[in-house]
Image (cartoon, grey):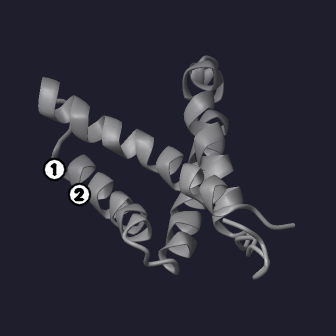
């Protein structure tokens, strides 16, 4: 199975949305601290590199997405009944990480040389 380059770009953009939200909310409401801003910056760096045509950075995005996906999956188990609304709130972010992890490890489908652009 292979994906198109557009699908992979969409996956990279979706991956960067939660981290961009942290930065934007921090600029508007002084919400995040230093650690959150550093994590957001480090997490956004591979996505920015991907959009500047550094294609190997998609694997780093995939690893960060897998870590985010696992963290979003483990938190409700660790919190027990206190986290019963966790899935309602964090399910969209969980799905973003799942999709970006999925498409970042799949190779891009190459167009045949005789195909018209």
**Residue placed under numbered mark 2 in the picture:** 38
- Where 50 falls versus 72 (above or below)? below
Q: Is residue 47 left or right of residue 78?
A: left
The residue tagged with tag 2: helix, strand or loop?
helix
Q: Residue at x 18, y 34 (%)?
A: 26
**Residue placed under numbered mark 1 in the picture:** 34
Q: How many marks?
A: 2
Residue placed most toward the observer, 48 or 68: 48
Q: Position of residue 82 (x, y in %)?
A: 57, 21
- Where 89 falls versus 78 (above or below)? above
Residue placed most toward the observer, 24 or 77: 24
Pointers 2 and 1 in contact (CB under 8 A)? yes
Q: Residue at x 23, y 30 (%)?
A: 25
Point out which mark residue 18 bears.
none
Q: Residue at x 58, y 24 (%)?
A: 86
Q: Position of residue 53 (x, y in %)?
A: 43, 74
Quadrant containing the C terminus in the rendered view? bottom right
Quadrant containing the N terminus in the rendered view? bottom right
Res 63 → quadrant? bottom right
The answer to whether residue 83 shows anywhere in this view is yes
The residue tagged with tag 1: helix, strand or loop?
helix
Q: Position of residue 31 (x, y in %)?
A: 19, 30
Res 41 → quadrant? bottom left
Q: How many residues crowd mark 2 within 10 Å: few (<14), some (14–19), many (20+)? A: few
The answer to whether residue 30 shows anywhere in this view is no
Q: Is residue 115 left or right of residue 94?
A: right
Residue placed most toward the observer, 38 or 59: 59
Q: Position of residue 4 (x, y in %)?
A: 70, 61
């Amino acid at each position: 199975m292979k994906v198109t380059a557009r699908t992979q770009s969409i996956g990279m953009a979706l991956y960067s949305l939660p981290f961009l939200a942290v930065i934007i909310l921090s600029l508007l409401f002084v919400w995040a601290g230093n650690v959150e801003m550093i994590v957001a910056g480090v997490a956004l760096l591979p996505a920015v590199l991907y959009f500047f045509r550094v294609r190997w950075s998609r694997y780093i995005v995939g690893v960060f997405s897998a870590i985010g996906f696992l963290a979003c999956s483990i938190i409700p188990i660790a919190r027990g009944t206190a986290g019963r609304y966790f899935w309602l709130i964090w399910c969209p972010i969980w799905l973003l990480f799942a999709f970006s992890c999925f498409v970042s490890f799949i190779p891009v489908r190459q167009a045949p040389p005789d195909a018209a652009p």
